[in-house]
């Protein structure tokens, strides 16, 4: 969902990226590898997702496959929001 | 005995044993030995000679592990640098140490490229992974298959009095100071700690701490000393992944800090992971609350818990034998093997048990001093009982009970401990003053259930300037490692002052 990605991208850009870097993050880029988010950053991202999308991220869902790129977050939210 | 001889002995004694498990795979001691040897040859080709400083700016990885031993093998002094470090601070450390080589990785190379033009001492910057260089000094990390045999000419002249490492630590003044550690300092510390912990060759040690932090670094050093296996993680960002690996590799030793243990204990599904092999948990950098100790022991009844205290300037000072936890859970113990510790009053006089005073440390683990900072050094190292020896003043106030067990009381300085990391308020204030429009700034620590202390900034803006809390935090994040970045920013009209016009932090909350 393009809208989901945009909302998350905006959150990341507003809170973690400095200036020019904002444009360079592609959908598949790993936030960890690019040093955009560290452990505290991921906790803030999870808080944002929980508030913004009214979900509860379970402990076992806190994994890179669900959170470590815009694509991954998008797929995760898709599954989460449609699971009901 | 030289520090890297632990590693070389392990390569010789256990060539096929798994030395390292990390995200790129599993490495035997022999394989790791080859990677380190190849890198040592490359460093020598690039001008690294005995006594030179080699900065290591890498995430926890096989490259970082190899680089530690490669630098030592050339007779050089390795400087492990936190991968979260931003360019200005990286340049500061390269310049301060007059480093001759910088070893890094592709995902950090952009930071190197900003730092390098600010430095003239680095001859080569070796980058692991694909990177299109801008600075002509940037060169690729060598491929381990270019089989050259290692020349040990560099380290063959070393004695244990020579420096092995410089580890930068924060201070109240704002500029990091390089703690000079000789081979003797580090071998001595590794021997003491591994002895009181009882580490064994069949241990599997998990390291979720950066190797740029001495607590993390020594997991590697001690692992090579006893010939154990090290499971090296980048961090504790995804706790369930770490737990999966702990179960898969039958991890027996888990060193952590309170923030990590808090996150661990918040995981509802913890019981799902088979951690029966876990026999030892260690804590240092910040105190574990009595409640946390109780919870940890309840969750892991099969493991011994070690509460410890130390500082970079001497690696470790105290440990509490696990059987004392029921008797005095809030103590950090007594001195470790081959070390003497005591409390002194304001005039340096030794105090009897049952007193409160500054903790001083005597032993072969005590640093040589701060690199090229004689005044700072003189504040911490003072003459000891035997002429010519120096003892370390910790800068921390402790009290002892009747049996000499130590209890932390307070720091003498204003350093904040957040996530187990040292935060110099001055360093954060300096970053704040670099923001256009900041008239005055003051940084304090405030209690935080997860972090221990959170960093809070009070800012007075000049006329006509307006920022949001987020603006200021982002500005700091661009210059400082994440644990230094304020969690809270309060904008105020004025800061409380003393009669002499100094900012009165005691009145801030």
Image: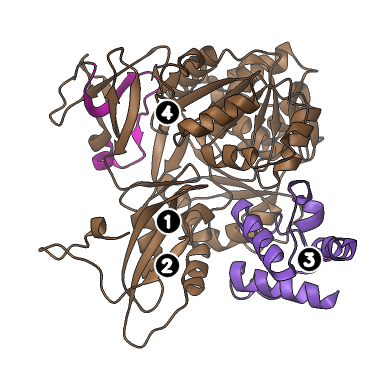
Chain colours: A purple, B brown
**Residue at the image position 54 percent from the left and 58 percent from the top:** B116
Q: Which mark is residue A59?
A: none
Magenta range: B353-377
Label 1: state its secondary structure: strand
Q: Which mark is residue B489?
A: 2
**Marks 2 and 3, how far apart at CA:** 29 Å
Q: Residue furthest left?
A: B499
Q: Chain of mark 3?
A: A
Residue bearing mark 4: B309
Label 3: state its secondary structure: helix
**Other residues around mark 4 within 10 Å, as few (<14) / some (14–19) / many (≥20):** many
**Other residues around mark 3 within 10 Å, as few (<14) / some (14–19) / many (≥20):** many
| Residue B185 or residue B171, whichever sits in front | B171
Residue bearing mark 1: B455
Q: Chain of mark 1?
A: B
Residue bearing mark 3: A70
């Amino acid at each position: 969902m393009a809208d989901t990605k945009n909302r998350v991208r905006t959150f990341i850009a507003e809170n973690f990226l400095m200036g020019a870097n904002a444009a360079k993050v592609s959908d598949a880029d790993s936030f960890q590898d690019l040093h955009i988010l560290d452990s505290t950053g991921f906790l803030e991202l999870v808080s944002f997702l929980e508030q913004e999308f009214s979900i509860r991220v379970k402990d076992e869902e806190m994994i890179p496959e669900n959170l470590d790129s815009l694509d991954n977050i998008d797929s995760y939210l898709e599954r989460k929001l449609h699971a009901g | 005995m030289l520090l890297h001889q632990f590693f070389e002995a392990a390569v010789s004694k256990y060539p096929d044993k798994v030395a390292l498990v990390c995200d790129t795979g599993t490495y035997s001691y022999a394989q790791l030995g080859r990677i380190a040897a190849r890198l040592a040859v490359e460093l020598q080709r690039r001008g690294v000679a005995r006594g030179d400083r080699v900065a290591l700016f890498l995430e926890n990885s096989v490259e970082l592990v190899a680089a530690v031993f490669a630098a030592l093998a050339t007779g050089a002094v390795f400087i492990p640098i936190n991968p979260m470090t931003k360019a200005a601070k990286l340049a500061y450390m390269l310049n301060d140490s007059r480093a001759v080589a910088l070893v890094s990785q592709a995902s950090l190379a952009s930071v190197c490229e900003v730092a390098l033009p600010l430095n003239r001492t680095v001859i080569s910057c070796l980058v692991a992974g694909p990177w299109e260089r801008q600075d002509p000094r940037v060169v690729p990390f060598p491929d381990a298959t270019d089989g050259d045999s290692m020349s040990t000419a560099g380290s063959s002249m070393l004695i244990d009095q020579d420096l092995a490492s410089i580890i930068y630590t924060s201070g109240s003044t704002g500029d990091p100071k390089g703690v000079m550690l000789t081979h003797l300092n580090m071998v001595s510390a590794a021997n003491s700690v591994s002895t009181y912990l009882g580490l064994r060759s069949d241990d599997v040690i998990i390291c979720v701490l950066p190797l740029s932090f001495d607590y993390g670094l020594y997991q590697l050093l001690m692992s090579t000393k006893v010939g154990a296996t090290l499971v090296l993680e980048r961090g504790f960002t995804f706790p369930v992944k770490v737990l999966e690996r702990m179960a898969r590799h039958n991890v027996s030793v888990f060193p952590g800090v309170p923030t990590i243990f808090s996150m661990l204990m918040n995981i509802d599904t913890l019981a799902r992971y088979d951690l029966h092999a876990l026999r030892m948990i260690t804590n240092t950098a910040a105190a574990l609350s009595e409640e946390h100790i109780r919870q940890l022991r309840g969750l892991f009844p099969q493991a011994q818990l070690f509460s410890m205290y130390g500082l970079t300037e001497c690696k470790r000072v105290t440990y509490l034998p696990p059987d004392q936890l029921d008797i005095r859970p809030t103590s950090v113990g007594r001195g470790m093997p081959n070390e003497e510790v005591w409390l002194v009053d304001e005039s340096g006089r030794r105090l009897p048990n049952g007193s409160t005073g500054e903790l001083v440390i005597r032993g072969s683990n005590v640093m040589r001093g701060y690199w090229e900072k004689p005044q700072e050094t003189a504040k911490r190292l003072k003459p000891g009982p035997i002429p010519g020896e120096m003892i370390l003043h910790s800068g921390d106030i402790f009290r002892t009970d009747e049996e000499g067990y130590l209890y932390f009381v307070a720091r003498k300085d204003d350093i904040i401990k957040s996530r187990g990391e040292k935060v110099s308020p001055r360093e954060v204030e300096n970053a704040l003053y670099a923001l256009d429009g900041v008239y005055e700034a003051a940084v304090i620590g405030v209690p935080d259930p997860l972090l221990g202390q959170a960093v809070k900034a009070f800012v007075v803006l000049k006329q006509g300037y307006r920022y949001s809390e987020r603006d200021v935090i982002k500005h700091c994040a661009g210059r400082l490692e994440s644990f230094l970045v304020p969690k809270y920013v309060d904008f105020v009209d004025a800061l409380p002052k003393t009669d002499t016009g100094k900012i009165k932090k005691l009145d801030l909350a």
